[in-house]
Image: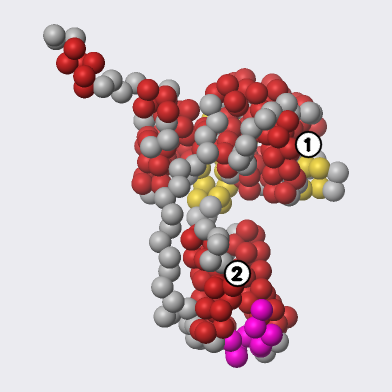
């Protein structure tokens, strides 16, 4: 079986099992990279070949990169070739890294540096509702119900639907955008039709550079949304629902990154001194 046939079969299997475009793209790339590295046909690749690839290309990357790569190879080889060449490879432990969070003032600074009204509306909506970038570009006109002041995220990560509150501050601009998009499917489009994730990522990264902010990505807005809600006293289970997290433990990371919440904690010496 050659590379093209193998890739086509992987893609078919992924689509049948309703995987996202993001997963399909990453799984196909991982398998293509391994085939290019080994210069072998897929059915000739061994566990040792796989280990050699990881040692050469992934040892300086985050553990999640190796875990994702192994998942992609395992899926392809078990689904197409009925052989798991990853079975004897021990998965690395995920590093526990705290996400980058912007303060509310940094969010304002970021918004001030956006160069067009459309960009400001898109990025404001991502922060205001905790959107993933894929959720923004897949948002459809019919997903917003202005009379009820809610919107729907359809089949997001994990094939989950959820609702979001339409921010009052953005309602008028969102209604204008809906009017502009009449006759189209998606709420935001570009010159060539549907926006890509790369389009939005470039807007965020270039704007962050102008604002003098480092390590800011699209997902930083989502992290900041959750942290700011927590700082404002919103119950963590409600935040879990707004983010669409299946497991509360995923949401609980924000309890460890809220600087404002940590500032509220009094030293036991302060409490003791009040009684001295």
- Residue that lies at the very extreme toward the left in this rendered image: 276
* Residue under the image location 69 percent in, 38 percent down: 204
Cβ–Cβ under 8 Å for marks 1 and 2: no
Residue 40 is one of the magenta-drawn residues: yes
**Quadrant showing the N terminus:** bottom right
Whole-percent x, y for residue 87 in the image: 43, 80
Residue 231 is one of the magenta-drawn residues: no
Whole-percent x, y for residue 24 in the image: 63, 65
Image quadrant where residue 254 sits: top left
- Residue 181: mark in rendering: 1
- Residue 165: mark in rendering: none
Viewer-side residue, 161 vs 74: 74
Q: In the structure shown, which secondary structural element does the residue marked by tag 2 occupy?
A: helix
* Residue under the image location 40 percent in, 42 percent down: 253
Magenta segment range?
Answer: 37-45
Query: Would residue 265 be found to the left or right of residue 178 on screen?
Result: left
Q: Which residue is mark 2?
A: 57
């Amino acid at each position: 079986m050659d590379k093209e046939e193998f890739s086509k079969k992987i893609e078919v299997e992924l689509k049948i099992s309703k995987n996202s475009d993001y997963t399909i793209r990453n799984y196909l790339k991982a398998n293509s990279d391994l085939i290019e590295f080994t210069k072998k046909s897929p059915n000739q690749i061994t566990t040792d070949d796989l280990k050699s690839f990881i040692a050469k290309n992934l040892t300086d990357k985050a553990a999640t990169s190796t875990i994702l790569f192994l998942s992609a190879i395992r899926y392809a080889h078990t689904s197409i070739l009925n052989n798991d060449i990853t079975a004897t490879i021990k998965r690395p432990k995920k590093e526990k890294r705290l996400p980058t969070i912007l303060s509310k003032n940094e969010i304002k600074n970021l918004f001030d540096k956006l160069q067009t009204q459309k960009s400001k509306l898109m990025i404001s909506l991502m922060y205001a509702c905790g959107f993933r970038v894929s959720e923004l570009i897949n948002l459809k006109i019919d997903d917003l119900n202005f009379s009820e002041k809610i919107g729907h995220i359809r089949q997001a990560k994990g094939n989950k639907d959820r609702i979001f509150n339409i921010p009052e501050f953005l309602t008028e601009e969102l209604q204008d955008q809906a009017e502009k998009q009449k006759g189209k499917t998606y709420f935001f489009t570009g010159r060539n039709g549907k926006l890509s994730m790369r389009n939005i990522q470039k807007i965020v990264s270039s704007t962050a550079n102008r604002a003098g902010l480092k390590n800011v990505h699209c997902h930083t807005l989502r992290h900041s949304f959750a942290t700011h809600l927590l700082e404002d006293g919103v119950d963590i289970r409600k935040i879990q629902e707004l983010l669409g997290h299946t497991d509360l433990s995923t949401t609980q990371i924000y309890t460890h990154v809220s600087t404002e919440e940590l500032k509220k904690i009094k030293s036991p010496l302060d409490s003791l001194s009040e009684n001295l």
